[in-house]
């Protein structure tokens, strides 16, 4: 297997690229910011740039990726080893302040994304780009693979009324872009007038899933411990907007879904029969499961439900499967099934399910126990526009 060379590894091994990085540096990274030998990106940056590395930044889940999900903030501090400030971009602010950016000439972004719109690292990227429009700061993105591939797009395109920290660009839920390509989308499609450059990967092709890259997986957030979870997440993130457990508090979060009192074998059999009736059979299998969340929703209660398994990544419709499964949970639970109304990612007036979906049409579809045909019609609205836009900013071949 040929190993993909990330933007970080290209930078640390190419003196000409290093020479193009000017002045004082800020570095946005997290625990998954490593090279192919598991070396920390911060250690490598400090080795190359020395005292020019002035400030570190962490995204949601923290600089060391130790913090759980929605609206659990991290603090700013002086790193006890590196002896430089670490600023949280998931704190009292999600946009870097003038004070944070003071004295910087280059802002390097090096995060492992997972290819789903609601995963907030691309929102953080967009906010940095917008903040730096009027500043003489170069943004340099060290690109990394999209672990769920660069070909398949899935899910609803964000509608303007549902713009939030879990959706800032009009792209599908599973968008098929790398971080570098998302930056190009902001710059070239949305005309964000800032100085952005991307150090591209070598060896990455759009057909690749994480297992094809030859790179080690380090969880990019606490509830995505496996690359398989990144693939199911494009669909299972929907369950965050409901009272179903999405497996937080288990060892396979966002690969499972369940609820107390469900008999998992009969439920799974009914679900598979419904799927078969509507022609949804390829690329996956569903396994009945009982799991016990140790924290968050239904903590300490056995939940009966489903473990979603991809059997063919090229054919697995992650978004469709989870939405159809959500419909069946609604059918099974009736009035016990709820869309939760708690604040979600600093939005206090819209339902989480609508912010996650980027539209209210999914919520209505679930409540009406709509058909697969109706779901696909909702899903594909705006896809062609995105496909046309995407073709203008791609950095990698098929």
Image (tube, rainbow, N blue to C red):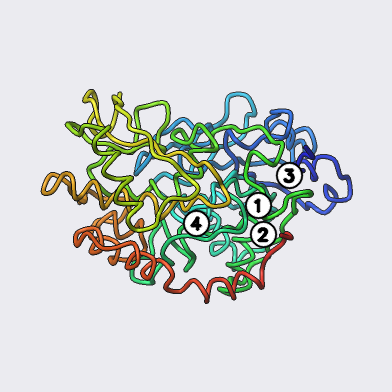
Q: Would you call the spot at circle 4 few (<14 residues within 10 Å), some (14-19), or many (20 or more)?
A: many
User: Which label's residue is closer to the chain start, 4 or 2?
Assistant: 2
Whether the residues at callouts 1 and 4 have beta carbons within 8 Å, the answer is: no
Location of the N terminus (image quadrant): top right
Q: CA distance from mark 3 to mark 4?
A: 21 Å
Whether the residues at callouts 2 and 1 have beta carbons within 8 Å, the answer is: yes
Asked whether, in this view, residue 67 is left or right of residue 32, the answer is: left
Name the mark on residue 6: 3
Q: Position of residue 382 (x, y in %)?
A: 46, 74
User: Which label's residue is closer to the chain start, 2 or 1?
Assistant: 1
User: Which label's residue is closer to the chain start, 2 or 3?
Assistant: 3
Q: CA distance from mark 4 to mark 2?
A: 30 Å
Residue occupied by mark 1: 107
Q: Would you call the spot at circle 2 few (<14 residues within 10 Å), some (14-19), or many (20 or more)?
A: many
Q: Position of residue 179 (x, y in %)?
A: 61, 54
Whether the residues at callouts 3 and 4 have beta carbons within 8 Å, the answer is: no
User: Which label's residue is closer to the chain start, 3 or 4?
Assistant: 3
Which type of secondary structure does the marked residue at label 2 adopt?
loop
Residue occupied by mark 4: 174
């Amino acid at each position: 297997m040929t190993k993909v060379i990330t933007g970080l590894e290209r930078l640390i091994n190419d003196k000409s690229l290093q020479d193009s990085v000017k002045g004082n540096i800020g570095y946005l990274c997290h625990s998954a910011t490593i090279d192919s030998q598991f070396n920390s990106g911060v250690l490598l940056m400090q080795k190359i740039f020395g005292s020019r590395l002035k400030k570190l930044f962490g995204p949601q889940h923290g600089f060391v990726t130790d913090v759980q999900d929605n609206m659990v903030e991290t603090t700013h501090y002086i790193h006890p080893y590196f002896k430089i400030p670490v600023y949280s971009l998931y704190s009292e602010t999600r946009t870097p302040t003038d004070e944070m950016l003071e004295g910087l000439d280059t802002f390097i972004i090096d995060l492992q994304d997972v290819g789903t719109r609601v995963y907030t690292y691309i929102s953080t990227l967009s906010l940095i780009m917008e903040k730096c429009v009027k500043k003489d700061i170069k943004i340099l993105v060290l690109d990394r693979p999209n672990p769920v591939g660069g070909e398949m797009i899935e899910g609803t395109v964000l509608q303007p009324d549902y713009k939030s920290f879990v959706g800032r660009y009009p792209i599908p839920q599973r968008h098929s872009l790398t971080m570098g390509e998302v930056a190009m989308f902001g710059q070239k499609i949305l005309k964000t007038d800032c100085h952005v450059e991307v150090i591209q990967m070598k060896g990455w092709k759009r057909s690749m899933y994480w297992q094809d890259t030859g790179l080690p997986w380090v969880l990019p957030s606490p509830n995505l411990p496996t690359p398989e979870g990144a693939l199911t997440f494009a669909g299972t993130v929907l369950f965050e907007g409901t009272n179903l457990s999405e497996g937080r508090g288990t060892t396979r979060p966002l690969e499972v879904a369940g609820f107390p009192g469900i008999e998992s074998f009969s439920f799974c059999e009914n679900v598979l029969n419904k799927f078969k009736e509507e022609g949804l059979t390829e690329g996956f299998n569903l396994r009945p499961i009982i799991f016990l969340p140790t924290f968050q929703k239904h903590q300490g209660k056995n939940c009966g439900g489903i473990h979603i398994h991809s059997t063919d990544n090229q054919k697995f419709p992650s978004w469709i499967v989870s939405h159809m499964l959500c419909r069946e949970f609604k059918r099974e639970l009736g009035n016990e099934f709820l869309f939760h109304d708690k604040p979600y990612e600093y939005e206090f007036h819209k339902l989480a399910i609508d912010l996650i979906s980027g539209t209210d049409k999914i919520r209505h579809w679930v409540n009406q126990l709509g058909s697969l045909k109706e779901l696909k019609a909702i899903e594909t609205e705006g896809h062609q526009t995105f496909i046309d836009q995407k073709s203008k900013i791609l950095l990698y071949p098929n």
